[in-house]
Amino acid sequence: MALLRNSDFWDDPAVKLEDGWNAFRLRRAEERDWVQTVFAFRGYGLSNAWIRVMARVVMAREEAFEHGLPLPNVVTDGVRGWRNFTSPPVPYAEVTIKIGDKEFTVDADRGGVVDTRIRAELPVGWHTIELTANGGEHSHAHVYVIDQDQTMGIISDIDDTVVVTALPRPLLAAWNSFVLDEHARNPTPGMAVMMERLAQHHVHAPVIYLSTGAWNVAQTLQRFLKRNLYPKGPLLLTDWGPTEGRWFRSGMQHKVNQLRRLADEFPNIKWLLIGDDGQHDPEIYAEFARRYPDHVEAIVIRQLTPSEAVLAGGRSEEMMGSTPGTPWIYEPDGAKIATKLEKLGLLPAARADAQMGANDDASSL
């Protein structure tokens, strides 16, 4: 039995098994004349300093291109979730990143994922950069550059916060990830309106989506967010599968690491942390607020319905008292959350929002 607990025995075979399977898929793709394709994701950066570039390099059929841009099979060929996982990744692929008239060369990791920070003196706002792999077709990534003096930002979980996924329930999670038509996924009630109000009120505040989901589904999630009118922002996802240290990556640790990184990268920003009580968001956010009390504006937890809570592992109301000085909002939908945000002064009253919209409409006539 001691042998079964020996991580060296289990971890190396897990990595080798995954690498061997990916190598087999890569050979098959090359035999079929598939080409290296860069799926570029939204990134972020600091004004006149640097940008964080994120992408994934996979093998894809040449017909996956339209107007010179790569499109995953899920767009051209259907929208079943499993299609996001069929393209073999290209480990350690060499990727050229073009920012204006400057070019940089970086290497993907063993899962084909590029996540790198590059020196770039760009002004505040959205910018478009170009990525290519192995001389193939180029892809475009949108990067939001944040003002160095920005003091407010928004970080939101995805699963059961902006989209109803029932992620903690294994069978339903598998159904939602691999089988369900992406157009059949349901947005969480009121959350899109609430977050859009936040983005309009805090005009230059970055909106960042943090999830334990795989990079494979990044473009599916981006389309979902756009289709349901959520504010535009980069996704911080992870790469599923074994590592040299463990059989499965830790979703909790991924979120903890990304939050700490954002605190270090943007020392002036206080974040509004939005999540749900179905997994570990309350514990993760509370830990972050204790470690970085000056980086948290408030913690918003979307309360699951009673049936969701039973199947998802219960609630976490006890966390609300563990962070003195940090306001908590704990409500079941976006409308009630918005009301509490108004009381905290993070949103204007709804009537003021409506009047502002009416004035904007009148001025456009």
Image (tube, rainbow, N blue to C red):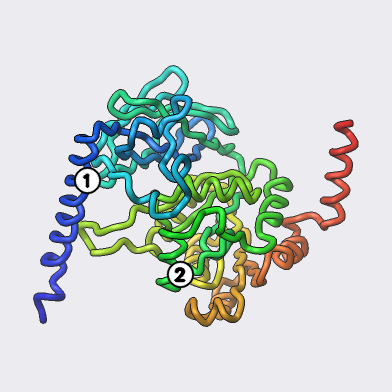
Label 1 – label 2 distance at C-alpha:
28 Å
The N terminus sits in image quarter: bottom left
Q: Nearer the viewer, residue 38 or 293?
A: 38
Picture quadrant of residue 105: top left
Residue 343 vs 56, above or below: the answer is below
Q: Which residue is mark 2?
A: 172
Q: Residue at x 43, y 51 (%)?
A: 217
Q: Which residue is mark 1?
A: 25
Q: What type is the residue that disc 2 sits on?
A: Leu
Q: What type is the residue that disc 1 sits on?
A: Arg
Task: Tally the numbered discs.
Answer: 2
State left or right for residue 160 relative to residue 238.
right
Element type at mark 1 = helix
Closer to the N terminus: mark 1 or mark 2?
Answer: 1
Q: Are marks 1 and 2 in contact (CB under 8 Å)?
A: no
Residue 305 screen position, x and y as percent: 61, 76
Q: Residue at x 44, y 67 (%)?
A: 173
Residue 293 vs 93, above or below: the answer is below
Residue 286 screen position, x and y as percent: 52, 69
Residue 341 vs 24, above or below: the answer is below
Q: Nearer the viewer, residue 187 or 31?
A: 31
Q: Residue at x 17, y 63 (%)?
A: 11
The C terminus sits in image quarter: top right
Q: Residue at x 59, y 72 (%)?
A: 324
**Residue 273 visible in the displayed image:** no
Residue 178 screen position, x and y as percent: 41, 59
Identify the mark at residue 222; answer none if there is no mark.
none
**Residue 6 visible in the displayed image:** yes
Element type at mark 2 = helix
Residue 173 vs 17, above or below: the answer is below
Q: Nearer the viewer, residue 336 or 170?
A: 170
